[in-house]
Amino acid sequence: MSAQAPIRRITVPQIAARKGAQPAAQSAAQSAVKPAAEPIVALTAYTAPMAALVDAHADLILVGDSLGMVVHGMPSTLGVTLEMMILHGQAVMRGSSRALVVIDMPFGSYEESPAQAFRNAARVMAETGCAAVKLEGGAQMAETIAFLTSRGIPVMAHIGLTPQATNVMGGFKTQGRDESTWPAHLADAQAVAEAGAFALVVEGVTQALADRITDSVTIPTIGIGASARCDGQILVLDDMLGLTGRVPRFVRKFGDLAADADAAIAAYAAAVRDRSFPAEDHVYR
Ligand SMILES: Nc1nc(=O)c2c([nH]1)NC[C@@H]1CN(c3ccc(C(=O)N[C@@H](CCC(=O)O)C(=O)O)cc3)CN21
Ligand SMILES: CC(C)C(=O)C(=O)O
Ligand SMILES: [Mg+2]
């Protein structure tokens, strides 16, 4: 009798290999050899129980700095600290066992220099056990991405609408409506891919620009508010569960958990007030 083999997490190279065979980027001869890859399924999670639910279905769990807004009620992601990311990262690692866990580097923890980024990303990996980090930025972060990946830290890049740059962009604005901006976005995608990023989040860009980006890089693109032709998709879990109030237009609510929670809390309040809770089953004798 042999012991049950431990469940291995999906690895960074396995995610990197999930580049979908896009018709525009592949010849007929190539597609005969290499069939289209299955899209990467990614979601955020910030807590152990939610990570366990996501882990059963997703390839990649992102501990996003969106947790500042979603969990902590902050007005933007700018106030999120490295300590917050580590605490939530530890919870998500405890709650999951199969998916690749990626943790967002928060604002101010990596932009100063490659050395600063390495010091803080190494701390995130050492204290959580996660396999990779994500950081926002294109060409300007290429040197840092190369520094980290060559020293053992896999990096997921994030371009387009980069929420940590909200004050530069003047809000959460869809990028790429003006075609004159396309070369800069394409250069960002090229730069992070060449620097060694294993995947690329493309957020809040027009569908046409997202498709051009997906066709122009050899690493998988993971879209959010981008295009169905990206090599994967990600959403903020609380948004797609219907737990958050106002959501961006790109969100599809696959559930209505806020309504379920409201009904349950209302029923509890009524039962306490009319003394029907606790009942016989809920008391000790
Ligand atoms: N709950 C939540 N979901 C997210 O997807 C998310 C966060 N929080 N926090 C961090 C960033 C911020 N994100 C956002 C927030 C708002 C819009 C938004 O309202 N967009 C406008 C676009 C208007 C335009 O076309 O320029 C929209 O109407 O959808 C987009 C992305 C995405 N991320
Ligand atoms: C929306 C994803 C890509 C993210 O960066 C986050 O949740 O912080
Ligand atoms: Mg983020």
Image (cartoon, rainbow, N blue to C red):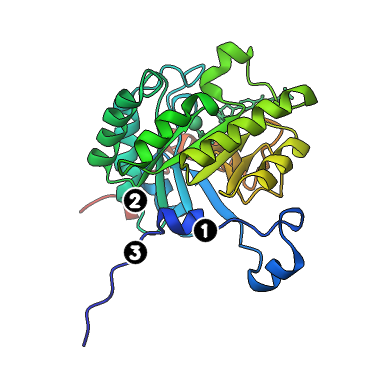
The vertical placement of 264 against 30, above or below, is above
- Per the image, the residue denoted by label 1 is 17
Residue 58: x %, y % from top left: 50, 55
Closer to us: 249 or 62: 62
- Image quarter for residue 67? top left
Residue 177: x %, y % from top left: 78, 25
- Badge 2 marks a residue whose secondary structure is helix
Task: For residue 41, say whether it is visible.
Answer: yes
Q: Between label 2 and label 1, give the one nearer the viewer.
A: 1
- Badge 1 marks a residue whose secondary structure is loop
Q: Between label 3 and label 2, give the one nearer the viewer.
A: 3
Residue at 42% over, 43% down: 276
Q: What residue occupies the far bottom of the structure in this picture?
A: 1
Closer to us: 283 or 96: 96
> Dot 1 surroundings within 10 Å: few (below 14), some, or many (20 or more)?
some
Horizontal side of residue 172 vs 274, given as left or right: right
Question: Alpha-carbon distance for marks 2 and 1?
Answer: 26 Å
Label 2 residue near ligand 2, CB within 8 Å: no
Residue 265: x %, y % from top left: 49, 37
- Per the image, the residue denoted by label 3 is 8
Q: CB atoms at circles 3 and 2 under 8 Å apart? A: no
The vertical placement of 278 against 119, above or below, is below
The vertical placement of 132 against 173, above or below, is below
Horizontal side of residue 176 vs 107, given as left or right: right
> Dot 2 surroundings within 10 Å: few (below 14), some, or many (20 or more)?
some
Instruction: Kindly identify the amino acid type of the residue bearing the numbered disc 1.
Output: Ala
Task: For residue 263, say whether it is visible.
Answer: no
> Dot 3 surroundings within 10 Å: few (below 14), some, or many (20 or more)?
few
- Per the image, the residue denoted by label 2 is 95
Instruction: Kindly identify the amino acid type of the residue bearing the numbered disc 2.
Output: Gly
